[in-house]
Amino acid sequence: TLVRLDKMGKIGEYMFFCILSQYFHFDCIIPKVHLTTDYNMSVYGIDALFIDKRNSMLLFGESKLTCNLDNGVSLIKESLNGYEKQIKDEYDLILSGEILKNYKNEFTEKYGDVSELCFSFDEFVQAAQIENIGIPIFIAHGTEVDVKLITEKLKKIPQERICGLNCIYYLISLPICNKDKMIASFTKKIKEKLEQYQNYGS
């Protein structure tokens, strides 16, 4: 019932997933929690892969759970330095690979045939006539709640073109006023679910 420090990132990614799907109504291409080498190691790369079917736009998301917003912004800026390579790697490893063949979703229905024929993200972008990509950025952070201050700090995140494409950035801040209470809520629910699974069929 204890959450190890190296698992906190997964809690942040789960909250990110809920916001993108429930608030923005984007469709998940593949849950990143499915892509783990083992129970103790998450897959490297993009934190969230979604598609906005209304605008035919792919979204490559990055999330951070940090002690304060300044630290989160700093970590995001560091991640974005190599984001073009990460997106291209994500295409090579997931979007064009065998992994998605077992997933029927908006991406495979719209782009499945195209992705099978393209060896690189650049080829795919041209063949699929992609003009825009979305970059949702989620920072769950400390107790800063002043909207003006948060907005000013988020403006420090560079918003540049990636892979020669127009990028639409979604900057999401989630202040955590009581981190201990949040962790307690997650661990309580995890314990309840674990007991349900253990008692199933008994």
Image: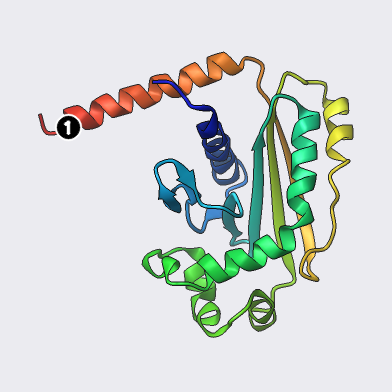
Residue drawn at (86%, 49%) of the image: 158
| 97 versus 127 height, above or below | above
| 50 versus 189 height, above or below | below
Relative image position of residue 171 (x, y in whole percent):
75, 42
- Horizontally, residue 136 falls left or right of residue 195, namely right
Query: In this orientation, which residue lies closer to the viewer: 200 or 132?
Result: 200
Residue drawn at (73%, 63%) of the image: 84
Relative image position of residue 88 (x, y in whole percent):
65, 68
Residue 56 can be seen in this image = no
The mark tally for this picture is 1
Relative image position of residue 201 (x, y in whole percent):
12, 33
Q: Residue furthest left?
A: 202
Query: In this orientation, which residue lies closer to the viewer: 5 or 148?
Result: 5
Colour setting: rainbow
Q: Residues within 10 Å of mark 1 (few under 14, many from 20)?
A: few
Residue 138 can be seen in this image = yes
Relative image position of residue 25 (x, y in whole percent):
58, 48
Q: Where the N terminus falls, by quadrant?
A: top left
Which residue position holds label 1?
A: 200
